[in-house]
Amino acid sequence: MEIYLKPSVRFVSLARRFVYDVYTDILKDADLAWRLGMATHELLENAVKYGEDGGMTLRVTTETIQGKDALVLTVSNVASQENARILREAFAEMATFEKPSDYYDMLMTRASTRDEGSGLGLGRICTEANMSLSCQIDSGNVVCIRAMTPIG
Amino acid sequence: VETIQIKDLKDRDFSTQTQQDGAVITVHMKGNWDMNAVAPLDEFTRAVQTQARQLKVERVVLQMSEVEFINSSCLKSFARWLGQVSKSGQDPYTVTFRTNLPWQRRSLEALKALAGDKVTIES
């Protein structure tokens, strides 16, 4: 499944519901579909908040990774130079944590005193959706974030 | 006897209904709490916190079973509140999240870690 969306707040919840409905039907696993929908929502909201005008692409595929079937969610968009830098730093910080739950606990504590933004989205995907995350940013600041979870 | 005076949220997509019964404030939350709900929820939780202090309640109950979704920015409003509940002597009450939705429990467990035994999660 691949959807191209204008970066609008109103499309985010619509996309989450669509992904949830479609993958509840396909996977016959409401919890996995909810986790996929939540990750969709958080990544699209980040793309709306921090992306440049131009659009965002949502893709959900199944892939075989190291011999196991996996569900892969990809959101791509163009970010500003500054937001691309912030994203690189967020992923670098995430990589310093061995356990996703420790990372999320740290983000939650930080969020409790933070003025702007929550900074919780990536940690929430790792922990609550139990999905592993990776990020690629090319020279044109095209950001591509992949969230992956095993299926079956 | 002082009773709670709070302006509930009534949006097309999300709403609250607040009531007080003695030393307990109960907030029924409904709907889809996405980016449009962030600022209203932040203001609302601050108002509930202020009222809970003024009325010297023992417990605030957040009924979440009719919440379709809550985004991470809205979770932050609870994180701010619970962070203060855990540290401040001005917030001597407990906060209870009530839900029967498995996905919500994951979010709420992360919040509970902020305030330990001053937060409970019930079905």
Image: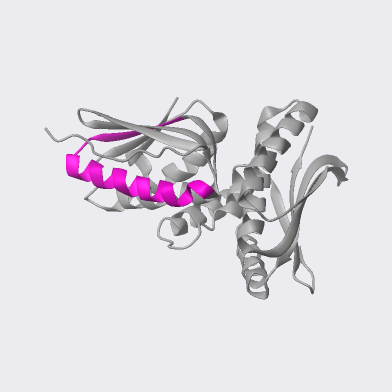
Task: Provide residue B112's location: percent of width, then percent of height.
Answer: 42, 42
In the image, residue A76 above or below residue B58: below
Out of B27 and A61, give the one closest to the viewer: B27
**Does the image show residue B92?**
no
Residue shown at 66% from the left, 58% from the top: A47
Query: Relative to B20, is A60 on the left or the right?
Result: right
Please give the name of the residue rendered at 75% of the width and 70% of the height, measured from the top-left corner: A141
Is B71 on the left or on the right of A144, as rendered?
A: left
Q: Estimate the x, y position of residue B93 in percent, counting from the top left.
A: 25, 40
Instruction: Look at the image and give the residue range highlighted in magenta.
Output: B36-64
Q: Is residue A63 above or below residue A30?
A: below
Regarding residue A30, the answer to whether it shows in the image is yes
Residue A102 magenta-drawn?
no
The x and y percentages for residue A74 are 77, 51
The picture quadrant where one finds residue B95 is: top left
User: Which is more toward the observer, B122 or A86?
Assistant: A86
Look at the image and name its color scheme. one colour
Asked whether, in this view, residue A133 is left or right of residue B21, the answer is: right
Dividing the picture into quadrants, the one containing residue A7 is bottom right
The N terminus of chain B lies in which quarter of the figure?
A: top left
Q: Image point 56% across, 55% down: which residue? A: A103
Among all residues in the image, which is located at the extreme front?
A: B12
**The C terminus of chain B - image quarter:** top left
Q: Nearer the viewer, residue A148 or A67?
A: A148
